[in-house]
Amino acid sequence: MIKHDIAHKEFYSHPENVKDLIQGFVALDCVSEFDFDTLERDNDSFVEKEKNERHDDIIWRLKWRDRWVYVYILIEFQHKVDKAMPVRIMSYVSLLYLNLLNNKKLNYGKRKKLPVVLPIVLYNGQRKWTAKRNIQDMVEKATDEMAMYVPKLSYYFIDEIHPEANEKDSVLDGLANSVAAIMKLQRILSSEEFYEFIDKVKNLIKDEKQKQKFETFIAFLLRYISSAYDKPEYEKVQNLEEVIRMVKTFRDFDREKDKKEFTKVGKLEILTNMIKKGILSLKQAAEEMGMTIPQFETAIKNLA
């Protein structure tokens, strides 16, 4: 699986992409009242040490009615579902509030209240997301008098790979913008779908206005390749056809790797069952995989 974190962080450093993400994938009525002209980056809300620890977090703010709303985008690219996500979100929002208080960056006017924070978890894993969405659901059920001490904080979840997990998904409406294009790219399974997708992008960007909308998508493709395969020179490529050729090459390479890995996993499972049934000894199974016994045992543990 290609590592997307650098490419994604760069992509969501552009306000137009944050706007498209919120408008296209956040199913909240209040979004229609957000003033996207006021959208500005605000990662300075965290002190330097904290920013270094959470390098994949992106913080924006924008006006909602007459007050600031903070949009906290947590980019989560991992194969395993993080069951502690509600706790992490609570921790991050608390730190954001502490720094806003220390920096005296409260909402304007007489209220002097802490701003509303919309935490968004952008997930890119292949596994279905099963973590709780609210910290309250992780805490033991309390009596009525203790209930007020149980924290309540949710995060908004967006799955880049599985559209059925999203309340709203603009990819289903076509390639409206760069955000939809990126998610569509990552959901493609077959070569036929990939070529069909690329043809649509090529046709779209023939129009100069559309081309500007997809500039960050093209930049994402370059980052996508260069960061995953340690080829920084690829970021200098300007020709779209060359970008597409490189993406195809590496997509095919990755799919071949995935296919081989799947075959290896399937063989391990079969051999493990044969050991359990007494058909093969541990030594025979290890030899079948071309491994030593310790290597085979480690492979089985990793598989589990």
Image: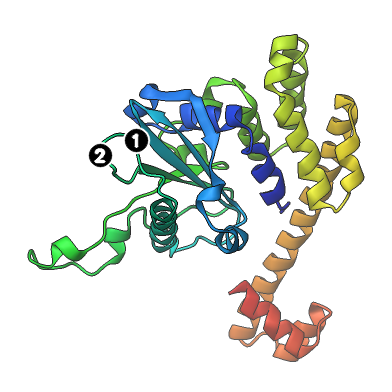
Q: Which residue is located at x 63 percent, y 38 percent?
A: 13
The image shows residue 92 at horizontal and vertical percentages of 45, 58
Q: Looking at the figure, which quarter contains the C terminus?
A: bottom right
- Disc 1 marks a residue whose amino acid type is Tyr
Total labels: the figure holds: 2
Image position of 295 with respect to 99: above or below: below
Element type at marker 2? loop
What is the residue that sits farthest to the top in this orientation? 207
Element type at marker 1? loop
Q: Local crowd at mark 1 within 10 Å, few (<14), some, or many (≥20)?
A: few
Residue 200: image quadrant is top right
- Write down the residue under mark 2: 111
Whether residue 192 can be seen here: no
The image shows residue 276 at horizontal and vertical percentages of 59, 84
Q: Which residue is located at x 41 percent, y 54 percent?
A: 93
Q: Which residue is located at x 10 percent, y 68 percent?
A: 143
Asked if the residue at tag 1 contacts the one at tag 2, i.e. Cβ–Cβ closer than 8 Å, the answer is yes
- Write down the residue under mark 1: 108
